[in-house]
Image: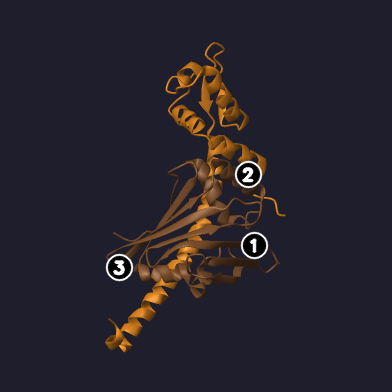
Chain colours: A brown, B orange
Amino acid sequence: MTNTATVNVTTPTDREVVMSRFFDAPRELVWEAWTNPRYVRQWLLGPEGWTMPVCEIDLRPGGSWHYVWRKADGAEMAMTGSYLEVAPPERLVSTEKWGPEWPETVNTLVLTESGGRTTTTLAIAYPSREARDAALKTGMTDGTERSFARLDALLDTLG
Amino acid sequence: MRTLHFGHITPDRLDATFAALADPTRRAILARLASGQASVTELAEPFAMSQPAISKHLKVLERAGLVSRGRDAQRRPRRLEARPLAEANAWLEHYRQLWEGNFQRLDVLLEELKTQQQHRGHTKRGDRP
């Protein structure tokens, strides 16, 4: 069977959205690609035309992270958070916030390996359904490019 | 701030669709209507809810254009309107594809990292545990 890895999205609860994806690499490498700024800025870019000039990762419990994306026309978006659990190469729990008006989410990344291949599962949890709906409402009327990573709020409603 | 453009769909319309979908009872009603039209009484049956409560949910679904009323004046059967759902789904697909774009870049990066690691394995075999 050929490897046709595509992202799978499920909504196990009212407050959660779970994305999973299979990668043809051992999990140490996948972990490295998700947590080393040198690599993160190479792939976590969203739509065409965006770069990631700021990618700061202080990978320890209590440590913080800060991402900034920029487009040639000057548009910018930023995201910050902190790490709650850091257990390489299998589990990373962090908070994520787009700005003061956004609800903070708790994101749990789990990497499982089988035969040198890795399944990554990212569970995004909102503090409440109301918070999720508020995020949804803003995300819906905001710009397409700016909100690419707000995917979670939107997908959550199709459960 | 840019406005969302996705064909002719307005953000308000998507707002209404997603807000309507954000409730498990309303999703269950839509799932029921997907297998054929039904009266309010029929729709209320599987739920531990009064008919007025179901009617309230139906109003939300009707306002979002997801449900319409049939011609039969007595039963007033509700039926599913597929178009807004298809539009919402297409819009979500757009976002899913953006993530898939990220992950495909990650695939390429991982291939590079694997090659580098294999290379290191050859040159520094003795150092590996």
Q: CA distance from mark 1 to mark 2?
A: 18 Å
For the residues labelled 3 and 2, the Cα–Cα distance comes to: 41 Å
Q: Amino acid at mark 1?
A: Met
The structure residue drawn at horizontal position 47% and vertical position 21%, both measured from the top left corner, is B43
Looking at numbered disc 2 in the image, what kind of residue is underneath it? Lys
Which mark identifies residue A112?
none
Which residue is farthest right? B1
The chain letter under disc 1 is A
Of residues A27 and B101, the one drawn nearer to the viewer in this rendering = A27
Look at the picture and state if A30 lies above or below A16. Answer: below
The answer to whether the residues at label 3 and label 2 have Cβ atoms under 8 Å apart is no
Q: Which mark is residue A137?
A: 2
- Disc 1 and disc 3 on one polypeptide chain: yes
Sequence-first tag of 3 and 2: 3
Residue receiving disc 3: A116
Chain hosting mark 2: A
Name the residue beneath numbered marker 1: A77
Residue A145 at x, y percent in the picture: 62, 58
Asked whether the residues under the numbered discs 1 and 3 touch, taking CB atoms below 8 Å apart as contact, a structural biologist would say no
Query: For mark 3, does the 10 Å Cα neighbourhood hold few (<14), some (14 to 19), or many (20 or more) residues?
Result: few
Query: SS class of the residue under badge 2?
Result: helix
